[in-house]
Amino acid sequence: MKLRAFALMALTGFATLQPARAAQDAFQLPPYAHAYEPQTVDERGQWMEADERERQIRDSPLRIREGNLETYLRTVLCHEVGQDRCAGVRIYAMEVPMFNATMMANGAMEVWSGLLLRVRSEAELAAILGHEFAHFELRHRLNGFKNQRGTSDAMAWISVLGGISNTPVGSANLSLLGSVYRFGRDQESQADLLGLKYLANSGYPAGSASLVWQSLMAEEDASALGRKQKPKQKYTAGFFDSHPASFERAARLAQEAAKLPAGGDARAKEFQEAVAPYLPRFLTAQVKLNDFGGSEYILSNLSQRSGWTGDLLFARAELHRARATPRDLQLASQFYRDAKGAGYSNPDLDRNLGLSLLRNGQTEEGRAALSSYLTAYPDASDAKAINALLAN
Amino acid sequence: MRYAFMIAVIVGASSSACLANALISPGPHAAIAQSRLSATPDGQWNRLSRRDGKNVELWTLDGDSLNKVTFFGGIPVGKPLLREIDKKNRPLPKVMSNMLITDIPALLESTYRSQFSVNQIQIETQEPALLDGNKGIRFTYAFTRADDEVLRKGEGIGAMVGGQLYLVTYEAPSLYFFEKDLEKFHKLITTLKL
């Protein structure tokens, strides 16, 4: 009886202590070493490989060198994790129209253009950058590598011993293999949590991290619907998944964010200004990916931030023109005209409007638009083909 | 027993003939890409055993990453140019009956972006052309695949004939190789017959 009462007392004691400790933990960041050098033979090897890979992406034709995009990304990260910590990081913006950012063992970070098209504010961007930085700071590459090596060693020994003793070892090896993936997912969750601390620490709204995953799930659903598939979100990660399911991540991040300071401005406007010069290029790549539902979701998201600008309307028209059902072509023509009304001034507009009308059988109007394209742009690289369409 | 052996030999020989790359000798070649497309090269080419689609045939001189001629022979409406690698997550755009000639290079571009992770591709010149008397388009382009990041140039000629897309393209690295064999491609496409 005495023992039970003591246990209960201890439990309630812990329970009252818990919130205070959680709040304290929130701002305890890992120790930081300036100009960190790899310590062990494993780490040195990993850094050497990462240095080589970094040289490739530094010189890659896909790197977005124009303007200040990389400088801006760096400013956001430095603001988030502090000047001293971000001094060990290089950020490369790459033209790849998918949602991703990766961190190498040596502190080089790749940010893909698809991510910049999808996140809706500086806070959401910071949530991803913070997560990636957390991988670096927690030396996840090294730990993951050691885990994989240790586990595969164990699997090899188990197979040998199983062979000698004539014992089946398949299920033991399978569960060891599963543990490698589970280890990776645990690292992702750790990086999510540390990233969240950085986010909250720097004054961005901590809820932004969860919003990124919510939006990504909505896009996946829209994409599936656009392809006439059943939208399917996993609630938990599968055996061989490298990352936790988006649903799990969104829920966990929202739960953890609730314990942290709410934060202030998400700086959507500042983010919008920074990516504005690259937006037409990112949109062009997106609408040509043959993903109607997903692209439409992205466009409607962007329009919530900035309203339907000329660039967005033009991209929307392109999306419909590519799918090219009669109703799409009708909508495309309308969106091209709306884009013109909203100030889109590139001569491509008249050409694509003309092509859309022509394809929909509206020959006279189509010809008029194509003629005005050729008048504005007589030396266009496709002038001869357009002239041939006019002559037909 | 002897019959079984002979059958095995015949099956083995015929399958190895299908699997192996083949020499294309100068002279007329019909039924290219399992279609009514024919050509009469005046030099030797190699036909790759790899097929990127049901009606796709690949010819090369030095290997397909250095110079590649792709014949798309009569791709019907509703079908993609290439065999889809991931139908569910990365479906390819399909040939449509109402395509204008300028939609042919656009279809190739969109296909490459999805299938080969080509994130940078530029359609350059576009002009009307005849593919064995059928109204079509001739176009040039430049692109970089994500896997090797080599800048390649390409040229193509295509037309919609009887509701099917016929397209022949030539691609090679812009450095040295494209110019080296461009003339051979130009000669080859003058001999195309449907």
Image: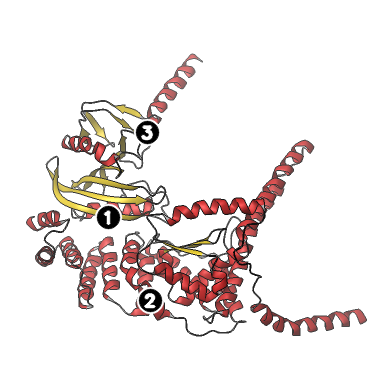
Rate crowding at label 1 as few (under 14), some (14 to 19) or many (20 or more) other CA atoms within 10 Å.
Answer: some
Please give the name of the residue rendered at 72% of the width and 41% of the height, measured from the top-left corner. A159
Please give the name of the residue rendered at 64% of the width and 74% of the height, measured from the top-left corner. A29
Q: Which residue is mark 3?
A: B49
Q: CA distance from mark 3 to mark 2?
A: 50 Å
Q: CA distance from mark 1 to mark 3?
A: 29 Å
Q: Which residue is mark 1?
A: B122
Q: Furthest-front residue in view?
A: A35
Give the answer, above or below, for where B144 lies relative to A191: above
Q: Which residue is mark 2?
A: A272
Give the answer, above or below, for where A112 lies relative to B159: below
In the image, what residue type sits under mark 2?
Answer: Gln
| Chain at numbered mark 3 | B
Residue A80 visible somewhere in the drawing = yes
* Residue A111 position within the rendered picture, expressed as x and y whole percent measured from the top left: 46, 64
* Residue closest to the eye, A17 or A320: A17
Name the quadrant containing residue B91: bottom left
In the image, what residue type sits under mark 3?
Answer: Ser
* Residue A226 position within the rendered picture, expressed as x and y whole percent measured from the top left: 37, 64
* Residue B158 position within the rendered picture, expressed as x and y whole percent measured from the top left: 20, 46
Name the quadrant containing residue A310: bottom left
* Residue closest to the eye, A226 or A109: A109
